[in-house]
Image (cartoon, rainbow, N blue to C red):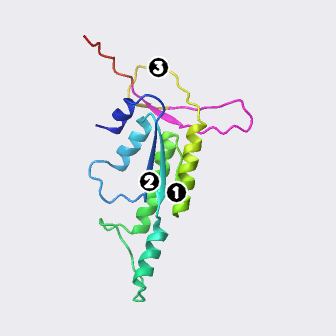
Amino acid sequence: MAITQHLNRIAGSKAIVILTDGVDTTSTRATFESSLQMADEVNGLIYPIQYQGYEDIIAKRFGAANSHLGATIYTTPSGEPIRAAYERGTRYLKMLARNSGGRFYYAEKAKNLVRAFTQIAEELRQQYSLGYYPKNQTTEKEKRRIKVQVDIPEAIVRARDSYIYKPQPPKKNKQ
């Protein structure tokens, strides 16, 4: 079952917290494009927390090896340089957060994980959800722009800038 179908079955506000290093070395069905599409379609906020970045991996490898044999280039199993994989992963995680209206966090140490989870929980407690029914309900799977403005001075508004319109299927009558 797709995550969007699963989340649509749950009542109320939804948030997805992803704890990852951001480097994908094993996906076979999900792609960069398909998961960004899912972030556009999901009715929930995505909060990626990137933990253990490139510098941490290199520091651990050099500390353990303590080799003076020359430059070493670390790669993913597919042969991509690890620095490029981490940079791509960071961009991807930021895009997931932005597309869903969530926020990206980077935690280079365990104490920063506590801070990230605390900030996410605090943000979720202080949110208001707005909803509306679009006037134009004729086209499906169309990306639509959205802009939220408030008349409260110094208010912080964090919202997605677009969404994918998908009409709700008619409810089946139980007999």
User: Quarter holding the N terminus?
Assistant: top left
Q: Main secondary structure of the magenta part?
A: loop
Q: Position of residue 159 (x, y in %)?
A: 56, 37
Q: Say which element carries label 3.
A: loop
Q: Position of residue 165 (x, y in %)?
A: 43, 28
The Cα–Cα distance between marks 1 and 2, rounded to whole angstroms, is 9 Å
- What amino acid is found at the position of numbered circle 1 in the picture? Leu
Mark 1 or 2: the one toward you? 1
Q: Which residues are magenta?
A: 145-166
Q: Quadrant of residue 168 in the image?
A: top left
Q: Which residue is mark 3?
A: 136
Using the image, tell me which numbered label, if any, was put on residue 155: none
Q: Position of residue 112 (x, y in %)?
A: 55, 59
Q: Earlier in the sequence, mark 3 or mark 2?
A: 2
Q: Earlier in the sequence, mark 1 or mark 2?
A: 2
Q: Earlier in the sequence, mark 3 or mark 1?
A: 1
The Cα–Cα distance between marks 3 and 2, rounded to whole angstroms, is 37 Å
**Was residue 148 drawn as part of the magenta stretch in this picture?**
yes
The structure residue drawn at horizontal position 39% and vertical position 60%, both measured from the top left corner, is: 23
Q: Residues within 10 Å of mark 2 (few under 14, many from 20)?
A: some
Left or right of residue 127: residue 175: left
State whether residue 87 is above or below residue 161: below
- What amino acid is found at the position of numbered circle 2 in the picture? Leu
The structure residue drawn at horizontal position 31% and vertical position 48%, both measured from the top left corner, is: 30
> Could you tell me if the residues under marks 1 and 2 are in contact, i.e. CB atoms within 8 Å?
yes
**Viewer-closest of 7 and 35:** 7
Q: Which residue is mark 2?
A: 19
Using the image, tell me which numbered label, if any, was put on residue 113: 1
User: Quarter holding the C terminus?
Assistant: top left
Q: Say which element carries label 1.
A: helix
Mark 3 or 2: the one toward you? 2
